[in-house]
Amino acid sequence: MGLLSKFSLNQKLGVLALALGALAVFANVAPGHTVKVNAKELLTGVARAEDHVTPQELAAWIIEGRADYRLVDIRDEKAFAEYHIPTAENVPLATVTDGALGRTDKIVLYGDGGIHAAQAWMVLKGKGYPRVYTLLEGLDGWKDEVLFPVMAESPTAEQQARFERAVQVARFFGGQPRAAAAPGAEPMALPVTAAAPAVAPPTLPAGASSGPKKKREGC
Amino acid sequence: MSAPFYKLGAFGDEASLIVAFLIGIGFGFFLERAGFGSARKLVSQFYLNDLAVFKVMFTAIVTAMLGVTYLSWAGVLDLSLVYLVPTYWIAQVVGGLLLGVGFVVGGYCPGTSVVSTATGKLDGLVFLLGFAAGTLGFALSFPLVKGLYAAGDIGTKTLPQVLGVPYGILVFGVVLMAVGGFMGATWVEKWMAAKAARAAE
């Protein structure tokens, strides 16, 4: 300790900082250095249904005006122009890793069905995007559950109440309820995307996820 | 367990407020222990009598930088997920000068004025009230200053990107700057003390 005690604490700390700084030159750290994707963790997340949001959840988020996530339509531009879920932005499947999506963003992906979105989800997860989700069943799920809800045959009181809320939500997004199970019926016409909602936002059922609004980060 | 904890979903929004509260208490505590609850101590910086502000702040920067570097190297922290404030260089030069003028005139910066008020100093409280009034004034006059607010937007930039040097070399460079700065600051303090002693004779 004789040698060390010749120096003040500040001097020792200064030398330590210099040593760590010099070592950092060889540490091979770059901002692109990412945490590895853990396959087990991914699969457990899927099994626990933590990888998707349901159409009803998404509808509630849009009605609440939540802005802490990005809704991404991965279909091509033509399909996007014909119809897309309100608030969605178009990032075609082939371009999802081209930089339009930030790695820190919370992202909800959807395509026509569930498969393309799930494939894009896998790629983004593999690239280290931690907060990516898919819309369950994609646009098909959105149509079946949100735009054109079906009432169950001989519904219970609870089902009836739930259906009435669903009708309100459907009208908000320009859809309408369907008659129960009509095989071969005319496909329902999709609402025009740009149309402003003609109906007042429905009141959400109690217990619907009420998430935070986007916060500013930093100091 | 990987970091950043919030981004990777280790805790939610409500818990993040508690974490921010605890970190804030820690920040205030160390500012106070460094003597930064006193406007005299802080303003000595500008008269070159006592460069503690420079030393404490630069020490914090170097400590955090080395910590982040080695956590990232160990694979515990994903640096690319850490939020970086975008650079609006014109807005930040103007804002930095304004803050500096306010610091010299008022004797505090925003964080230290809170520390000072918490330790019962009236000048800190006055500064804090001015700080609140200024914030309100900024919000109300925002349409007028909106152009300046976003002036010089060059996006999110880091020093390795701008200077084109590898990350590790930049880290070493900053440490060298800090240690050199500390030695220089100590020399300046001794020189000023000697000058004051001569003037007193």
Image (cartoon, coloured by chain):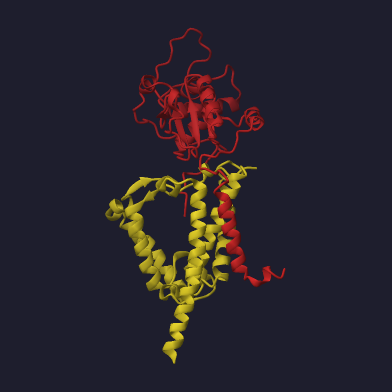
Chain colours: A red, B yellow
- Tell me which corner region of the image, top left, top right, bottom left or bottom right, holds residue A199: top left
Q: Nearer the viewer, residue A49 or A10?
A: A10
Q: How many marks?
A: 0
- Position of residue B135 relative to residue A56, above or below, is below
Toward the front, the furthest residue is A3
Q: Identify the residue shown where x is 55% and y is 62%.
A: B27
Q: Is residue B114 visible?
A: no
Extreme-right residue of the structure:
A1
Say which quadrant the N terminus of chain B sits in: top right
Foreground residue among A133 and B8:
B8
Classify the position of the C terminus of chain B by image quarter: bottom left
Give above or below for A159 relative to A3.
above
Residue occupying the point 71% across, 70% down: A2
Residue A146: % across, % down: 49, 25
> Residue A74, image x and y in percent?
44, 24
Residue drawn at 52 percent across, 27 percent down: A55
Residue A123 is situated, as x and y percent measured from the top left of the image, at 53, 27
Depicted A24 relative to depicted A157: above or below: below
- Residue A90: image location, x then y, percent: 40, 27
Residue B61 vs A107, above or below: the answer is below
Q: Is residue B107 left or right of residue A195?
A: right
Residue B9 appears in the figure: yes
Residue at x-position 44% and y-position 90%: B200
